[in-house]
Image (tube, helix red, strand yellow):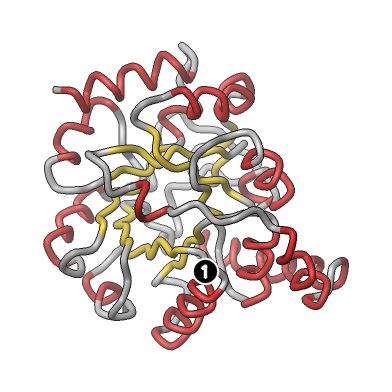
Amino acid sequence: MKTILDTILADVREEVAAAKSATPLSEIRAMLADAPPTRDFAEALSSPFCLIAEIKKRSPSVGPMREENVNEAAAAYSASPIVKAVSILTNQRHFGMSIHDLAAIRSTIPHPVLRKDFFVDEYQIHEARAYGADAILLMANVLETSKLATFHALALDLGMECLFEVHTLDEISTLPPKARVVGINSRKFKSQTGFAGLDGSSEKDFSLEMSAFELVNHLPQGSIRIAESGISPANLATVAKRFDAALVGTSLLRDPRGIRECLTDFESAIAR
């Protein structure tokens, strides 16, 4: 039986094939000369505990975000003192946004931008830089050890940083020696249950396994440690004791009070 990750990766490969057909790699490489200079993703996260705040229109785990929060996100993140980088999902089918959305949003904000996607092809890395990304996400449960190293080297050559994402101790062991930013994701992407899917909606996220954060002491020494998924103002103080930053999306984008009110709660939690 397919997991949600299997389904997403199959769709990603179709999207990459379509992108290559529409805009060949030679054209993407030509665009690099006009790409905006990179902003230092790792340096931005080297300040006191901060957030990488996310923008997406939907999620496989819970369904649609609140449209008004998504529309307000870029301005709210730009004004927040605790947001130091912005993550933008570029997987159209499952998260509702594209690389063109990334380019448009980056032009309006002062923060480094992470292209968050399921990277399976070097084309996506060139595309990320061509459209203005400052960093990319590399998932250790998607890429074998050699590909993690190759993709990392290419991203660095293009001036970008990488956020390496792990879920298990074995995945940590596959990271390149010079991995600078490493995140532990509590989401069980290889599960066959717990996801609302494309047509569903859930008020509760059943795809999380918060015990994954216990692996924090096994992350590479000196790396910038990121907690991903399941972070809310209620548990942020605990997370902040062991991590350098948190990647937060759903909590902000689904809050019925509005995204700015939720950010205020995160600010108060950090200040405790």
Is residue 160 shown left or right of residue 82? right
| In the image, residue 81 above or below residue 38 | above
Q: Return the x and y of residue 182 as percentages of the image width and height.
A: 31, 62
Q: Return the x and y of residue 159 as percentages of the image width and height.
A: 53, 67
- Read off the residue under disc 1: 1
| In the image, residue 160 above or below residue 148 | above
| In the image, residue 251 above or below residue 93 | above
Looking at the rendered image, the quarter that the C terminus falls into is top left
Q: Secondary structure at mark 1?
A: loop
Q: Return the x and y of residue 89 as percentages of the image width and height.
A: 58, 48
| In the image, residue 134 above or below residue 210 | below
Q: Residue at x 77, y 69 (%)?
A: 28
Is residue 233 shown left or right of residue 139? left
User: What is the three-letter code of the residue carrying label 1?
Assistant: Met
Q: Residue at x 56, y 37 (%)?
A: 63
Q: Residue at x 63, y 61 (%)?
A: 128
Q: Return the x and y of residue 225 as percentages of the image width and height.
A: 25, 55
Q: Residues within 10 Å of mark 1 (few under 14, many from 20)?
A: few
Q: Residue at x 17, y 58 (%)?
A: 216
* Between 107 and 1, the one nearer to me in the picture: 107
How many marks the image carries: the answer is: 1
User: Where, by quadrant of the figure, is residue 170 drawn?
Assistant: bottom left
What is the residue that sits farthest to the right in this orientation? 22
What is the residue that sits farthest to the bottom in this orientation? 146
